[in-house]
Amino acid sequence: MRLLLVDDDRRVLAVLENLLRREGYQCDRVQTGMQAVVAAMENPYGALVLDVSLPDIDGFEVSRRLRDEGCWTPILMLTGRGDTEDRVTGLDSGADDYLCKPFEKAELLARLRSLTRRGVSPRPPSIVVDDLRLDPADHSVFRGEQPIELTTKEFALLEYLMRRAGTVVSRAELLDSIWGYRYGAKVVDVYVSYLRNKIDRPFGHTSIRTVRGVGYELVPGEEQEVSA
């Protein structure tokens, strides 16, 4: 499998490449954000290992640009920043996983195995639940005719709930499917609150139901899928 390594420190790139090559990965290396965007758009990488601190555009912006351009290659973001706000920013920008430096080599390899097993997320047809419509192809959400702006992780959470409308989804399932590792149940509760503030409360709806001690359910009236 071919990976793209992105870091402005040549020594870090060399260490990463030596480690990953010993595990059987092929690696390309770039040192700027724009080089990363170009390389990722032009090559079918199995995953990106992306540092946040880059000399031109940072890793957050690289991730946003790739997702906006329809590139859904899994991204593992590396950073020396350990603040919760920075981790959330990384995930919201479109990264699939977030690892703080310094890290154990075994953990890095385990995170990469998890990401590459999942592969590139498919972009399926639009989903409609009552007057709520979500289109994965162009990352749009509408309540009736009103567009709703969501972050990447809010969008992923809503898509997961809509695809399982009428079914109670546990916090553990949401963590595993959206964040890719056990980030902590609280992050699910926080993002559900964000969603409610955007898709429900402004429209007088209560479509996301809390099931105490279990998780959440998006309660449908009528659900259907339509072509994009």
Image (cartoon, rainbow, N blue to C red):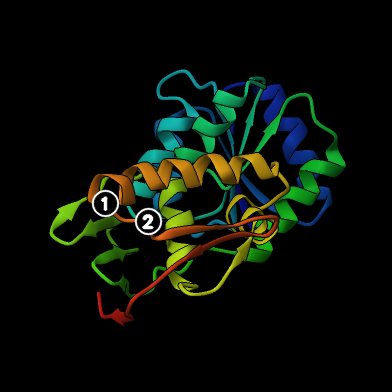
The residue at which mark 2 appears reads as 206
Which residue is nearer to you in this view: 35 or 200?
200
Which residue is nearer to you in this view: 28 or 116?
116
Reply above or below: 3 against 53.
Answer: below
- Measuring 65% from the left and 47% from the top, which residue is drawn there? 27
Residue 23's label in the rendered image is: none
Residue 178 place in picture, x, y as percent:
57, 55
Reply above or below: 20 against 205.
Answer: above
- Measuring 43% from the left and 41% from the top, which residue is drawn there? 194
Reply above or below: 120 against 97.
Answer: below
Considering the image in quadrants, where does the N terminus appear? bottom right
SS for tag 1? Answer: loop
Residue 115 place in picture, x, y as percent:
65, 56
Q: In the image, what residue type sits under mark 2?
A: Thr
Q: In the image, what residue type sits under mark 1?
A: Gly
Dot 1: within a 10 Å radius of its alpha carbon, few (fewer than 14), some, or many (20 or more) residues? few
